[in-house]
Amino acid sequence: MSIDIKSGHQAKSGINHIRLTSHKIDLPSVPQIKWGAQDPMERGPVVGTVSERENRNCIGSHSGSYTIYRALSIASGKFSPSHRPDLNNTEPTDSIEPQPSWFEPDRIISLDPWGANVARDFHSYLDQGYNIQPTIAVTQARLQLPEIREAMAAGRLQADEKFVTANGDVKVTKVAIDPVWHLPSVAKRFGLEESELRKILFKETGGMFPELVTRSDLKVLLPPIGSTTAYIFGDIKDLSNTDVELTCRVHDECNGSDVFGSDICTCRPYLTYGIEDAVRTAQRGGVGLIVYFRKEGRALGEVTKFLVYNARKRQKGGDSAATYFERTECVAGVQDARFQELMPDVLHLFGIKKIHNLHSMSNMKYDAIANSGIEVVNRLSIPPELIPDDAQVEIEAKKAAGYFTDGEVKSGETLENVKGRDLEE
Amino acid sequence: MSIDIKSGHQAKSGINHIRLTSHKIDLPSVPQIKWGAQDPMERGPVVGTVSERENRNCIGSHSGSYTIYRALSIASGKFSPSHRPDLNNTEPTDSIEPQPSWFEPDRIISLDPWGANVARDFHSYLDQGYNIQPTIAVTQARLQLPEIREAMAAGRLQADEKFVTANGDVKVTKVAIDPVWHLPSVAKRFGLEESELRKILFKETGGMFPELVTRSDLKVLLPPIGSTTAYIFGDIKDLSNTDVELTCRVHDECNGSDVFGSDICTCRPYLTYGIEDAVRTAQRGGVGLIVYFRKEGRALGEVTKFLVYNARKRQKGGDSAATYFERTECVAGVQDARFQELMPDVLHLFGIKKIHNLHSMSNMKYDAIANSGIEVVNRLSIPPELIPDDAQVEIEAKKAAGYFTDGEVKSGETLENVKGRDLEE
């Protein structure tokens, strides 16, 4: 399966010798990955470094899509291709302790639970000179959010100096998680043969990573997609304790609302209300968790999202809750590409078994969480006064499609009459 | 250069036949791309569709890194691989008119200026059945931002109903732009041979896209990285008019601050103050522009960023402005991977020749803009009262490193004494 070619016409020296794909080498130098093994040394480290190719045991490279910028850095001469990260002092501020969920077959398949403290768990490999990089980082921060200050001014939230200071600063532990996909388990979760998944991932991306099809011995992929961030209010260890009340929102990125406050959807209101309630839960002895997934525009991207906005606003009869999902499918080919099937992995990283308060309307999210074996006690929507006027189309369309609500579900003419603003307004 | 292999042991039918890389075919069916040509039909459309491979004239596929999710959609059976987008009603709400900058050699190299209105500019190709997808989308929106309401309450901004409503809604035109790289021009901008750039992009990403090295006839790459969004306050046509006052911020994503308000940096305060001033400029007859680049953590990603935060906070002597940049280089191998060299392309898309007010401290941004031939009249920092306490380390480190300031530049012991919070606080 190994193909070496000379590229270009004037291949004069070794520097022009390009290997289109790697080939399997059975050397003790390549750490084996035994996904789900209990002992980290038996599980083995994920070695995705590009600098020492001979030690790699996965497809792709670190930092998701930022690997392209790393390559540009090397092209520009600013970055040494042989750089090794100095991990001194970078270790997690809070430890994510191993959980039984780490060792259940096929429970965690899209991230590496051993990715946070590689200096502790794989020190003997590091001592031998392996270039092992963390795929998870844990730090502490303080958040200054106008919506938290508004909640305090409205009397919904009080300062306690432990979680919220008098001026509204919120103390938080945050965890950044890069994607690490165990391909056999991903295939299983989607009900596919592994070889079929590999072929589709290769072909339908325009030919990304030939090793997907040539290196069936490499079971792990570091895909060039965005990372995930978990924000924990309270003690990270309480997340796995079913006796401690847990308030949680799993939030998919929406840059237009999350950052710019666009009023066509309810994304930022749901996010900031989720934070507010997560903080309140910590204050009464519970723990709060917000997970932020980089899946802009239902993982279709912002260009597609804006095309859909235009098609929604311009269609005959105007933007209507009755045709909300249809327009996305016409333009994008699919209503949603977020694959909530992979989402609960991050909950299992923390050993979560019970969510007392889930802030989400989405049945896809709820089903994915429940199907992964986590009990959900209460499902919560945001208070109606926090929904922007133009976002009524989204909210009513979602309720009519079976999303969770404890209120009225509109249909027929009533649903058609839920209209958004025209483009000209 | 074409290599076909049989994958797996039991290749019984054509379905297991995988082509590791494509090969050049000289058929009239493949539209040629003549980058920089004045007539769109002479320039030719970028055809990145995966469904009809025979028509492709670029490497990679649409939607940046979301192409992975599209592939997963196909794997799950939810998406037809032969889906063709219905572009009806998706066309731009405001037209981005061709500018002289579109035709200057090597001026715009990382986006496709003809990517917005493909139904108008490439209708004859579409009529022939080519699957051409927009790489730019233009729509209109209203923003609801707490910081805008705060600016109104403080008397810094007034409602006028044209740009800002009484309840603080801001009217805006927004433009999403997917990356489209013309490889010969990118190589030239970085001072490299094209073949060298292609080899590095292939090798240092862990072998992404063999066509980078096998298909030197394909000059365009759709890289799996994030998109860029431009928010325009006022008339999009005024951006190219040097007589109209232009206020601009070019902003690199920082999810922790932009969305969650983390107080370790000044990202969201710079962004929202930039929006406020862009709106004020529109109100006095000018035009405002905010460009949002998906380059999280200096394009190193959030995992690296959090590792650096920990190393900064834990180093001997604590987090100090004097060692701010050094810690990033130790962990990441480079201080910054954002490549402001590519950033001005979006300014040239709109024909910008003069920026009256640039909201940025960054010399890298200023130099890139000035070196691309755009005049910058005033450089503006945010008012000191908008800088969070813990972000003083970042601000003073940047000033000491030569970033723009109209204030004092600290050095030596004074700089060392600018300290951030400990991790435990």
Image (tube, coloured by chain):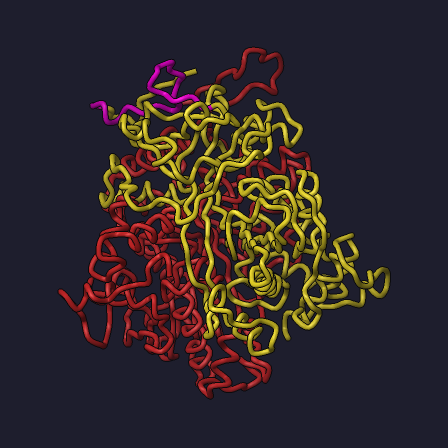
Chain colours: A yellow, B red
Residue B341, image quadrant: bottom left
User: In the rendered picture of this protein, how many numbered marks are placed on residues?
Assistant: 0
Residue B220, above or below A12: below
Question: Residue A132 at what x, y percent from top left?
Answer: 34, 33
Which stretch appears magenta? Answer: A12-33
Question: Residue B94 at what x, y percent from top left?
Answer: 54, 67
Quadrant containing the N terminus of chain B is: top left
Work out whether residue B279 or residue B88 is closer to the camera in this orientation and state it: B279
Work out whether residue A243 or residue B278 is closer to the camera in this orientation and state it: A243
Compared across the picture, whether B297 is left or right of A253 comes to left
Q: Residue at x 56, y 82 (%)?
A: B162
Compared across the picture, whether A298 is left or right of A164 comes to right
Q: Residue at x 56, y 59 (%)?
A: A282
Work out whether residue A243 or residue A195 is closer to the camera in this orientation and state it: A243
Q: Residue at x 48, y 62 (%)?
A: B260
Question: Residue A58 at what x, y percent from top left?
Answer: 43, 28
